[in-house]
Amino acid sequence: MRMQELAPPPGWLTRIPSPRRPLEDIPVPADPPVRRRLLALPSLTGAGFAALFYCLAFTPSLLPRVWFLQGMVAGVTAAMGYGLGAALGALARRFLGPMRAGTARIAWILLLAAIPVLVAVFLWLGTRWQRDLRIRLGMEPVPEYDIARTVGASLLTFVLLVALARLLRLATHGCACLFRRVVPVPAAYCAGTLVVAVLSYTAFDGLLMANLFAMADRSAAVVNNGTGNGVTVPSSALRSGGPGSLVDWDSLGRQGRSFVVSAPTTTELSEFAGRPATEPIRLYAGLTSALTVEDRARLVVREMDRTGAFSRSVVAVFTPTGTGWVDNKVTQSLEYMYAGDTALVSMQYSYLPSFFAFMGDRSEVVDAADALIGAVRARWAAMPADTRPRLLLFGESLGTYGMEMTFGTPEALVDGADGALLLGPTFANPAHRALTEGRAPGSPIWDPSYPGLPIEFADDAAELRDLTGPRPTVVYLQNATDPVVWWSWDLLWKKPTWLTGKRAADVTPDMHWYPGVTFWQITCDLVFSNKVPTGHGHVYKSETVDGWAAIAPPPGWTTDDSLRLRARLDG
């Protein structure tokens, strides 16, 4: 639809109602039919910007994209470009006047000739970039026929978004036609825009998003009530849900049931350690294990007293992800290192995936982390300093946010326990943000140095094996290609620091920041951030061996032991 159709009709000032002229006698110009408005020719500048943004959408980002995600990114960014170009074209016509017909015809011919060439070039480049990125991350290249499906998905996305925009514009024009019978045309269009914006937001937030969250909640609730394959009621009294446990097996939830039964056997632990091992303790409280978050935390501590957890060498508190999941390679790595002389505890605060839990109500993870860490620390701090176990803290993804909010500052996090390991912190983490903003001059944001505190960052877990000086109390593992770490709203309009200067080895040199485009690319990277090999994206797994070894190694632990354990966990 042509933008000039939104301009006030000639002579609108003469149609303002007056006491001597009845309102119903005011002539209103006839409007183009709805079909003409919906099927109007595209804006010249809009088409040009859409083609430019479409091509830029094929540039690489942090992670490889499957065909339908690439198609969605291209379609969305092309629609953004069309909207921007159409708006700029309207402003140009408003202040400079319309383009001459002959000039416009030549511009269209040149644009239509250039678009196929540009798209073909960037499809070829995009395919090469994606292949190189997959090889960089140790993944298999995608088949060539994905190009056709990508183009189809992108065109469908673009057409649907532009059609939706035209419908909203038509609704705005319709409202303005009603309002301009009683107010001047500029005011009528302002009122129409406001009405459509309010109704659109209400429909999006109250209908689409509310129903999306409701569907996710129902689906997650069903999953939470299930039990994973091979997971059965434990026969050991050292597990929540087992004999003598204060926690009912059915109240643990799917992830809690998997957590308590997934410890290695004493035979496996002894075989690795080369000496007799102890049966590990694993304790957990699900959402229905007690009425309130404080009651669940107290229940976990009572379970710890019941099983003798505080007599072990290590007590570790795990703040899980949104569903209550804790990576079993993270827990097993600590149990293998200490030959089972450990007590690992965790507590569920939601059964929604981390994305929905993060966007919905972050206070749940904060309340749960604060309650459980606080309860365990209070019981631990009451013990004599020379007899109490090592207290370790762990968080991954959304769990790191809960941990950091519990302590508030980097200094409090350091003083909060004997060691803390945080994997893939989010952009909203307050302590992580303070540390990266206050990093030592010259140190990159993806591997910052922070003098004065025993805190270590690593984008590659292997670098933790060569640390010199005092042992760190807090370790952040943040893969350079983890979109959970690097996503933020200001990617829409601001070039990120991690794309400035020296880059991490995993980040392709072909990646560049483009307004709007890079934001959607990183947003889509979040979807498949767990579908890449260990050490890339949001996948850490056995890397935690090096993290634990840097913070709290058992006596006599060596780098060879770390390598041997990582090989066992990855095998």
Image: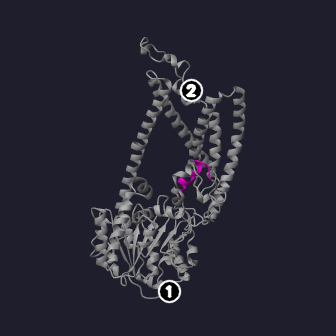
**Residue under pointer 1:** 556
In this picture, residue 302 sits left or right of residue 322: left
The correct choice, above or below, for 271 with respect to 170 in the image is below
Residue 289 visible somewhere in the drawing:
no
The correct choice, above or below, for 487 with respect to 196 in the image is below
The residues colored magenta run 513-525
- Say what secondary structure mark 2 lies in: helix
Helix, strand or loop: magenta stretch = helix
Residue 196 visible somewhere in the drawing:
yes
Q: Residue at x 60, y 42 (%)?
A: 81
- Where residue 384 appears, x then y in whole percent? 33, 82
- Say what secondary structure mark 1 lies in: loop
Three-letter code, disc 1: Gly
Three-letter code, disc 2: Glu
Q: Nearer the viewer, residue 170 or 394?
A: 394
**Which label was assigned to residue 5?**
2
- Label 1, label 2: how far apart the Cα atoms are: 79 Å
Is 517 covered by the magenta stretch?
A: yes
Disc 1 packing (10 Å; few <14; some 14–19; many ≥20): few
Quadrant showing the N terminus: top right
Is 515 covered by the magenta stretch?
A: yes
Disc 2 packing (10 Å; few <14; some 14–19; many ≥20): few
Q: Which residue is at the far top?
A: 20
In this picture, residue 112 sits left or right of residue 212: right
